[in-house]
Amino acid sequence: MPVYRDDVVVLRTQKLGEADRIVTMLTRQHGKVRAVAKGVRRTASKFGARLEPFMVADVQLWEGRSLDVITQAESIASYGALITADYPSYTAASAMVETADKLTEAEGSLQQYLLLVGALRSLSRREHGAGLTLDSYLLRALSMAGWAPSFQDCARCGARGDHSAMVVQVGGIVCDDCAAPGSPRLDPATIALLGSLLTGDWEHTTSTPPQTRAQATGVVAAYTQWHLGRGLRSLEHVSR
Ligand SMILES: [Zn+2]
């Protein structure tokens, strides 16, 4: 039976039988993988503790007929404990792994893996605040999946300029000619913040007032829910 190794980030786990667990992982090289971890619930095994959500690990797997089997797991980064110790970080991380899970339904990519690991690391270090880190992650993950929003030129006709009407279904900000009557309008500061979150320009995010962040968060949540169809359960629990 072929054996392979990869770096993984654990997205979620579910019980299987008496003592086993199915672990869903986003891997560096093999896309998304669901594999069985045997016996991890029988004892307080170190092996099992390395395969909790938000953990990054170096894993060895046996290729199975239906599901692969995890035979070894070495922790690379234990962001899990640092993240779960802080409720806003925990809810943000939960929304991130659920988004990654949905976006990689067809196939994962190295970029999605690196983006998720980087966002979890940042959360565990409390670098930018949980809400901003989550919003930036969501915008960038959706962009990688082919749904890059436009926060500058009109998302429908491409007209240049400073527009303010937001149409989630079209993919961002639209000009006055393209805006339907009654389209919500965003403050220039909110549009600037959304642009910074999309590009990871953290310098311009830290001094933004709470109402600007709240408006940006509303846009990101609506944009994410629109593209992910039935919506994210964990996004509802994010404390904003
Ligand atoms: Zn237009």
Image (cartoon, rainbow, N blue to C red):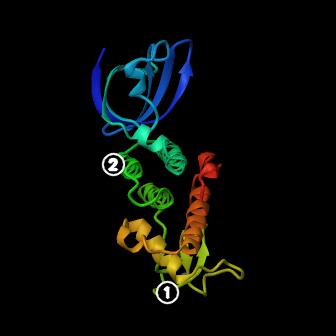
Which residue lies at the image location 56% right of the left edge and 22% below the top edge? 15
The quadrant in which the N terminus is found is: top left
Give the x, y percent position of residue 129.
Answer: 46, 59
Q: Residue at x 51, y 59 (%)?
A: 131
Secondary structure category for the residue under label 2: helix
Most distant residue in the front direction: 85
User: On the image, numbered disc 1 is attached to which residue?
Assistant: 162
**Kind of residue at disc 2:** Leu
Three-letter code for the amino acid on which mark 1 is drawn: Asp
Query: Is 216 above or below relative to 128?
Result: below
**Residue 27 seen from this side:** yes
Q: Earlier in the sequence, mark 2 or mark 1?
A: 2
Q: Residue 207 in the image: x percent, y percent?
A: 44, 74
- At mark 1, the secondary structure is loop
Residue at the spot of label 2: 114
Query: Marks 1 and 2: in contact by CB < 8 Å?
Result: no
Check disc 2: other Cα within 10 Å, few if <14, some if 14-19, many if 20+: some
From the image, which quarter does the C terminus lie in? bottom right
Q: CA distance from mark 2 to mark 1?
A: 33 Å
Q: Residue at x 46, y 79 (%)?
A: 152
Residue 146 at what x, y percent from top left? 45, 58
Q: Crowdedness of circle 1 by 10 Å Cα count: few (<14), some, many (20+)?
A: some
Q: Which mark is residue 24?
A: none
For the residue pair 53 and 195, the one nearer the viewer reads as 53
Position of residue 140 relative to residue 11, above or below, is: below
